[in-house]
Each structure stands twice: as C-alpha cells, then as structure tokens.
Image: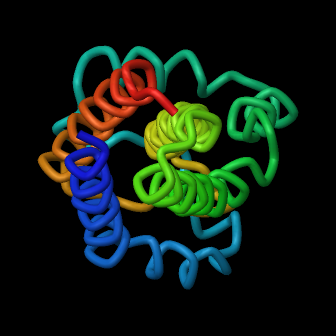
Amino acid sequence: MAIVVLVLWLLTAGAGFYLLVTSSLGHAQAASGVPAAAVPSRAFQPAGASRRAMRRAARDRWDPPSLTAAKKAPILPGARFLLEFAHPACALIGLAFWLGFTLIHDRILGWIAVALIAVTACVGLAWFTANVRAARRGASDRPAPSFAGRLIVLHGCAAAVTITLAALTALVTRG
C-alpha cells in the first residue's frame, strides 16, 4: 500500500508541476512592473458587466483614496510569494519522508510524511484562495496567475486521495 501511495504522490506532484509549467505564473511575475496608474479603476466597468458589479462600482466611486488603497491592499503582503515556495517545498520534503517510510517501514517517518502532506494541502488551499482573491480584487502589486480549472481539480482530488491513503497506510502499518 505504501508503494501505491508513493506512485499516487508522484502523479499528484507531476500534475502540480504541469500546472506550474502551463500557468501564467511566469508571465504574471514579468508583468508586475506595471505602474499603479496604468491599472484600470474598478469604478469603470465594461458594458457587459453584471448588475452586482455595476452597483459595486457606483458605490466605490465615492470612496476616498485611502479606503480604495486599503481595499486593494493584500491582507498579508508577500504571502503569495511565500505560498508559491512553501507548497512545492513541503510536498517534496513530505515525498522524501514517504519514500523513507516505504523503504524502511518506520511509522515515525510515515507520520511525519502524513503531517507534511496535510501542511502542503493547507498551504495549497491558502495559495489558491490568495490567487482567487487577488484576481477578483484586481491587485495592482502583482497580477494573479491563471491556472487551468480541470487541472486544479485533478491535482486537488489526487492530493485528497493521497492524504487519505497515506494516513490509512501509516495507521495500519506495523513498524
């Protein structure tokens, strides 16, 4: 069972790597030098905007500049940079611990790997949420990268199955 989890973990990592390669993450980093004046205001909506967006634009039109800046400011500045690094780093370290568990069958290595994959999942969800919020807000500090929706669902489902199987395997393995 540990080998099945290892293969599934590798497939999940492969899907994640493919997500990074095919995303606009590199383009988003290159475009971060756009001055704030070049970013269109939320007050001017395109003609095909929804009624909700039009009401929000009308309400936001009267906001003072300090409130507008506070609405556009990230909750934790630089958190997206940290999450971009931490998600793959925790996943690779957890994969190394799971490989050690697969070869040695030491329960401590297995539980460390399970804890790291849980942390990886939490960091991945936080990264996804930060990107979605930045895309909705139209953050001017750094544009949100775009990822293929189906691949994110595939990556997330594979990660959920990996977490479940890894925990079950570490639980039932005698070592």
In terms of depth relative to the viewer, which is nearer, 25 or 4?
Answer: 4
**141 is higher (above) or lower (below) than 121:** below
Residue at image coords 78%, 54%: 78
Residue, far left: 150
Quadrant assignment, res 27: bottom left
**86 is higher (above) or lower (below) than 34:** above
Residue at image coords 28%, 45%: 5
- The color scheme shown is rainbow
Residue, far right: 66
What is the x, y in percent for residue 20? 37, 70
**167 is higher (above) or lower (below) than 158:** above
Quadrant assignment, res 135: top left
Residue at image coords 44%, 29%: 170
What is the x, y in percent for residue 34? 63, 76
Instruction: For residue 43, say whether it is visible.
Output: no
In terms of depth relative to the viewer, which is nearer, 141 or 161?
Answer: 161
Q: Give the quadrant of the N terminus.
A: top left
Residue at image coords 26%, 71%: 18
**151 is higher (above) or lower (below) than 142:** above
